[in-house]
Amino acid sequence: MSCISKKEITDFAKAVGIDLIGFASADCLKGYKSFLEERKSLGYECPIEERMPDKRVSPEFILPEVKTIISVALSYNIEYQVKLPSKSFGIISKSSWGMDYHLVLKEKMKRVCEFVKSKCPDVKTVSLVDNNPLLERAIAYHAGIGWFGKNGLIINEEYGSYLFLGEILINEYFEPDTPQESKCGDCDLCMKACPTKAIEKPYIVNANKCLSFITVKKGEIEEEFLKKLGRRIYGCDTCQEVCPFNKEAKKVKREEFTPSKLLPRPNLIEILNMSNKEFKEIFGPTASSWRGKSVIIRNAIIACVNTKDQECIEPIKKLLKSPSPLLRGYSAWAISYLEERDKAIEEIKEALNKEKDGFAIKMMAEALQKLER
Ligand code: B12
Ligand code: SF4
Ligand code: SF4
């Protein structure tokens, strides 16, 4: 393109704090349609993914004149020492520390688009981060940002895999960059470490078994995942924590991702007692709030049971009267594990007598059955 070069865009993007940038052809996703159809037939697709394979591989549905996709990546591998409380704590994935990355990355991409338009006034651009049907990892791979790790994540040799991805669709042609060969080699540490064996084959993640999805799933969680959730309140970092490329990865100083009100290891009792206002203040500015308060508190209840934390009993007893049937149901379930048997039977029976919601009744009845066996 004559009005601006790849180098000028790259230099400007780096100047506004984008760590990695690459260029991919607008049709780089076309070959993935059959892969998506196979994945769907195997039941690996989770409900929060776009269902229509055509939409997933067609940037022209978003910008009809698109010729190039500029892929950008922002590291969230920040310099930060996590303080481990002695007890009653949950775990928040690194991807949700500090400010919501959608906003942080979009702001930087907006500046890149403005810069391009200042040189090329007629150019059309669309910026995307996460909430879009396109296969962002495949775009990053084709733009040479990194390779597909066996855990499914895009890994860059210098920055590792703690990267957020974004794209700028643009109606101008730029020479595509070269994809990188996988450097995973014989390593299979992520596959071994995954608590649910969600990485069913190298590079293939069954999203329905991934704890990251389970922490945002609405409603009831299948029995087989309850213990495996451990202390996780939002997301899962296990397959990245064990990755040798993250051990060596460059750390970044990034104010935006430094934890503020929501700590990486938040106090479970505070989560259980949280009002709507406190939820908005603590979780609202981060990427972990989109599923709402009840899902986060449900996960905290499960973490209390998994860590056999007696201090959780009183706040959980209060949740038996919560307006949320999900929380009333999970409180009864938790009381059957944490409370002394006779007291637990009495408390759950009292709640069950007043209960009208089908889900909560089922959870309470199952908790009683377990105790009276
Ligand atoms: C739905 C979704 C999820 C779901 C499903 C994830 C999954 N693995 O499928 C859940 C909730 C589980 C999830 C979890 C996470 N997610 Co997510 N998620 C998405 C979302 C919205 C769509 C992903 C998707 O469609 N997956 C389905 C499959 C088909 O797509 P894929 O993962 O790209 O699969 C590729 C590979 O399998 C590869 N492939 C297939 N066959 C083969 C064969 C070989 C040999 C090779 C080499 C490759 C290969 O090609 C596929 C097509 O790209 C994207 C944003 C987006 N629009 O893309 C973010 C995104 C993928 N998530 C992201 C993040 C950060 C996470 C978490 C780390 C968050 C956390 N800490 O909890 C975890 C990681 C879990 C994991 N191991 O993948 C980042 C990934 C950044 C990166 N470095 O790769 C993205 C890109 C969001 C963003 N904009 O930054 N996520
Ligand atoms: S995010 Fe957790 S559950 Fe999902 S594949 Fe990685 S280790 Fe497994
Ligand atoms: S842990 Fe090993 S196999 Fe898994 S993504 Fe990292 S290098 Fe690849």
Image (cartoon, rainbow, N blue to C red):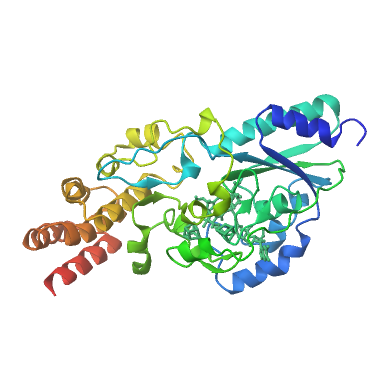
Q: In the picture, which quadrant includes the N terminus?
A: top right
In this view, the residue farthest toward the left is 342
- Residue 246 is situated, as x and y percent measured from the top left of the image, at 55, 48
Question: With 277 as the anchor, is 353 left or right in this view?
Answer: left
Q: Position of residue 262 (x, y in %)?
A: 39, 36
Please report the residue visible at 75 percent of the width from the left and 51 percent of the height from the top: 59
Instruction: Determine the residue positioned at 20% across, 67% down.
Output: 365
Q: Is residue 341 left or right of residue 230?
A: left
Q: How many discs appear?
A: 0
User: For residue 370, which quarter of the picture?
Assistant: bottom left
Residue furthest out toward the right: 2
Q: Quadrant of residue 187?
A: bottom right
Horizontal arrangement in the rendering, residue 44 relative to residue 366 (left or right): right
Query: Residue at position x 29%, y 39% from top?
Result: 274
- The quarter of the image holding the C terminus is bottom left
Task: Locate residue 324 relative to residue 10 in the image: left or right.
Answer: left
Q: Is residue 128 above or below residue 38?
A: above
In the rendered image, residue 120, in percent from the top left (x then y), is placed at 86, 29
Q: Nearer the viewer, residue 292 or 24?
A: 24
Is residue 135 visible in the rendered structure shown here? no
Write down which quadrant ligand 1 falls in. Answer: bottom right
Q: Please identify the quarter of the rendering in which residue 195 is found.
A: bottom left
Q: Position of residue 105 (x, y in %)?
A: 61, 36
- Above or below for 41 versus 279: below
Q: Is residue 269 visible?
A: yes
Query: What residue sits 87% from the left and 45% below the top?
Result: 175
Q: Nearer the viewer, residue 28 or 273?
A: 28
Q: Is residue 172 above or below residue 8?
A: below
